[in-house]
């Protein structure tokens, strides 16, 4: 019995040792597992966006060493970065909304690298923040400054008219509201902002402000009454939505102008001209379907349904350039740079903003009288005669004034590349006895003929005049110096150039001395030869 008990005690002790060893093993496993979990927990790397920098990288105590950081824009171009305190800040300016891909690489310690890998890479794609205006249409009390608010603080702002924004502020302490200072009671501007100091200002947004009123208030760009080019878009912005302000109808323009209306947002209508745009030298008027309130200066409002702008006449210089290109002047014109594009918009814009270039005489032997009258950029008789010839050729009422109809026809011919083929004619008459008429055409003297000018008391006036009426035969009547009346039917080859004075045939026994009542009389054969060369617009010079 004693022997059996000792054996059982030995067996029991063996089991106890096994349990102890098993427990120790399990404890070591748990300890190792805990160590692995702790190592994993303390070796993390995270990459996230940041409220001031482009991104932030966080490396935990056992994470290792930040070894490599790089960023790329949407076009694959590298974006240089500064790394400070885990913040990744671009060293070149980004565009708001620009997509950037960031990659960081961390090198782990040797023992942890053996277990988890020597390197860990994190990638993040994000967008540069965009600063949005929180209110586009504002009511501003009289006398108050205009403040523009943003949905988040901004670091820089620029504002002004479309395409002409001016940088106004770089803010060391970003703000959510920017003052535009004192402004007209009603107005609009484009404003662009940067949410971060490392961004450029973003896409401009239109903001408008209005005084307090029980009616719909309207702001216009350009301002009512301002001069505009034929191709200037017209923007109407209302304090209420377009449908509330105008109903279902759009405004109408007078004179009729090709183009189209579109709603660019709920409060704004924009008219974009097409073709040649608004007629040059016109008063462009918009008729609204309903009355609105507009400012009249200061903060005062008036009720109206009509708004006007002035479209200036085309420049004299551009008028001469086009007339020269189309063969109506004795000069040619060449641009100093690229020629004006043959599009309606480009031609219309060039009419008020002429390109630079040079004029050259078409003929080496141009009469000195004609040369003396020419002045680029200045109204002169040569230009007036060319306009009259252009009007007659295009069946426009002849007055020598480049009105809207003349400009529209000029621009149309410019687009079509048309050029006059009949050449350039000039007539000059010497009153010195023997009196002579000279017909010059396209660089050559075509004819020299004896002529008669006016007698004493009815002298042919000195000067240069364009032909304004051109008829093969007619009746000429008037008053003699003694007060008696005359009426001569059947007068041939008449070209009126100054009041009742004309070049024409008249049967006389001789020519070369003053015999007429102011006209330039020619023998029949000479008059018949001269007449085809003297259409409306031809210049006639009477000199001593």
Image (cartoon, rainbow, N blue to C red):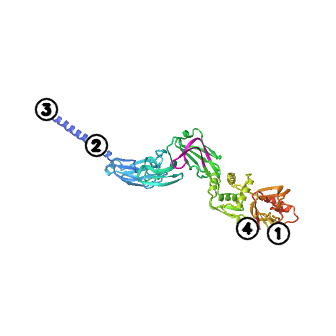
User: Which residue: 87% across, 61% down?
Assistant: 507
> Dot 4 corresponds to which residue?
368
Which residue reaches farthest front? 483
The overriding secondary structure of the stretch rendered in magenta is strand
Residue labelled with disc 2: 34
CA–CA distance in space, label 3 to label 1 = 171 Å
Residue 309 horizontal/vertical position (percent): 60, 50
Q: Is 125 covered by the magenta stretch?
A: no
State how far apart marks 4 and 3 are (Cα).
152 Å
Residue 434: mark in rendering: 1
Q: Secondary structure at mark 4?
A: helix
Residue 364 visible in this rendered orientation of the protein? no
Q: CA distance from mark 2 to mark 3?
A: 43 Å
Which of the two residues, 294 or 193, is positioned nearer the viewer here? 294
Q: Position of residue 456 (x, y in %)?
A: 81, 65
Circle 3 residue? 5
The magenta span reads 285-308
Measured Cα–Cα span from mark 4 to mark 2 = 109 Å
Q: Tell me how far mark 1 sits from mark 2, CA to CA.
A: 129 Å
Q: Is residue 499 above or below residue 146?
A: below
């Amino acid at each position: 019995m004693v022997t059996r008990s000792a054996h059982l005690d030995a067996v029991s002790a063996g089991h106890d040792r096994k349990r102890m060893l098993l427990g120790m093993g399990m404890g070591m496993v748990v300890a190792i597992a805990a160590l692995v979990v702790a190592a994993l927990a303390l070796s993390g790397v995270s990459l996230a966006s940041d409220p001031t920098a482009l991104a932030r990288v966080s490396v935990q105590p056992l994470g290792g060493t930040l070894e490599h950081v790089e960023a790329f824009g949407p076009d694959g171009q590298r974006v240089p970065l500064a790394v400070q305190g885990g913040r990744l800040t671009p060293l070149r300016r980004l565009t708001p909304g620009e997509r950037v891909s960031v990659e960081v690489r961390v090198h782990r310690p040797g023992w942890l690298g053996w277990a988890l890998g020597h390197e860990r890479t994190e990638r993040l794609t994000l967008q540069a923040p965009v600063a949005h205006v929180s209110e586009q249409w504002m009511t501003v009390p009289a006398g108050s400054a205009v403040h523009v608010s943003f949905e988040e603080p901004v670091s820089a702002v620029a504002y002004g008219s479309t395409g002409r924004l001016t940088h106004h502020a770089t803010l060391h302490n970003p703000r959510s509201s920017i003052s535009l200072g004192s402004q007209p009671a009603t107005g609009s501007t484009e404003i662009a902002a940067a949410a971060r100091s490392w961004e450029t200002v973003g896409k401009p947004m239109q903001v408008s402000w209005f005084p307090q009123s029980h009616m719909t208030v309207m702001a216009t760009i350009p301002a009512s009454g301002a001069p505009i080019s034929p191709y200037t878009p017209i923007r109407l912005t209302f304090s209420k939505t377009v449908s509330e302000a105008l109903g279902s109808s759009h405004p109408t323009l007078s004179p009729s102008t090709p183009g189209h209306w579109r709603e660019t947002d709920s409060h704004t209508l924009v008219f974009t001209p097409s073709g040649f745009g608004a007629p040059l030298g016109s008063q462009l008027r918009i008729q609204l379907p309903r009355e609105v309130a507009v400012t009249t200066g200061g903060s005062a409002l008036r009720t109206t349904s009509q708004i006007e702008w002035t479209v200036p006449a085309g420049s004299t210089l551009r008028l001469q350039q086009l007339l020269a290109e189309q063969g109506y002047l004795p000069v040619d014109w060449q641009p100093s740079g690229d020629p004006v594009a043959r599009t309606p918009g480009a031609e219309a814009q060039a009419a008020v903003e002429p390109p630079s270039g040079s004029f050259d005489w078409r003929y080496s032997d141009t009469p000195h009288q004609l040369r003396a009258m020419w002045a680029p950029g200045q109204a002169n008789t040569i230009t007036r005669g060319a306009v009259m010839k252009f009007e007659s050729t295009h069946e426009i009422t002849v007055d020598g004034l480049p009105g809207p109809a003349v400009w529209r026809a000029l621009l149309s011919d410019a687009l079509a590349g048309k050029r006059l083929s009949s050449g350039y004619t000039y007539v000059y008459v010497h009153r010195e006895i023997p009196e002579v008429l000279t017909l010059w055409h396209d660089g050559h003297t075509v004819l020299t003929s004896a002529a008669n000018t006016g007698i004493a008391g009815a002298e042919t006036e000195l000067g240069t005049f364009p032909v304004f009426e051109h008829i093969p035969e007619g009746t000429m009547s008037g008053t003699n110096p003694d007060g008696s009346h005359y009426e001569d039917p059947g007068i041939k080859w008449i070209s009126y150039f100054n009041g009742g004075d004309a070049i024409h045939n008249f049967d006389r026994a001789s020519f070369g001395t003053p015999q007429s009542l102011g006209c330039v009389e020619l023998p029949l054969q000479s008059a018949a030869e001269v007449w085809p060369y003297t259409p409306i617009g031809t210049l006639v010079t009477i000199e001593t």
